[in-house]
Image (spheres, rainbow, N blue to C red):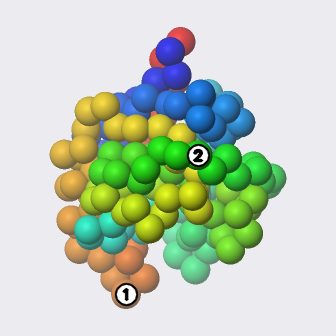
Amino acid sequence: MHEVTLETDHGTINIKLLPEIAPETVRNFEGLARKGFYDGTLFHRVIPGFMIQGGDPNTKSGDKSTWGTGGPGYAVKAEFNPKPHARGIVSMARAADPDSAGSQFFIVVADSMFLNGQYTAFGEVTSGMDVADKIVALDRDGQDCPRQEARIKSVRVSD
């Protein structure tokens, strides 16, 4: 089925994964979710008119200086595809190297076509964009980190 449910402290976000366009990325995301990797992490970066980003295991600690730098200890090769980065698309976050994604992901809250062909789109929100909208609207600091926690309680894969 390739569907996941993100339970957050702001509500539920349901995502349909897209293995037909990003098979290794979906396999990686589902594997991490099944291990509980994402449980307890935060959406640590929110930019109104753009996206919310999460999936960093370092956000389980209080040391904000490490947030945005964590991952599973390996990288996944980019799977650029023709899926446009429209509102509701779920895509992998990465560093400058296109093949540096690991666990961090973002949900696009406004069409961001400038990302097309540069980031791996691997899912789309089927319900819960209102939750993403609540999270992106949180007051944030100078590093786009929400001042109020936006915690991912769990990520569950539908079998």
| Sequence-first tag of 2 and 1 | 2
Q: Residue at x 33, y 46 (%)?
A: 88
Q: Amino acid at mark 2?
A: Asn
Q: Which SS class for mark 2? A: loop
Identify residue for label 1. 142
x, y percentage for residue 124?
A: 40, 38
| 14 lies above or below 62 | above
Q: Single out the residue that lies furthest toward the right.
A: 74
Q: Which SS class for mark 1? A: loop
Q: Residue at x 23, y 74 (%)?
A: 139
| 67 lies above or below 26 | below
Answer left or right for 116 relative to 33. Answer: left
x, y percentage for residue 55?
A: 54, 52
Near-viewer residue (94 or 120):
120
Q: Residue at x 43, y 29 (%)?
A: 16
Identify residue for label 2. 81
- Label 2 Cα crowd, 10 Å radius (few <14 / some 14-19 / many 20+): some
Q: Amino acid at mark 1?
A: Gly
x, y percentage for residue 149?
A: 34, 61
Answer left or right for 81 relative to 44. Answer: right
Q: Are marks 2 and 1 in contact (CB under 8 Å)?
A: no
- Label 1 Cα crowd, 10 Å radius (few <14 / some 14-19 / many 20+): few
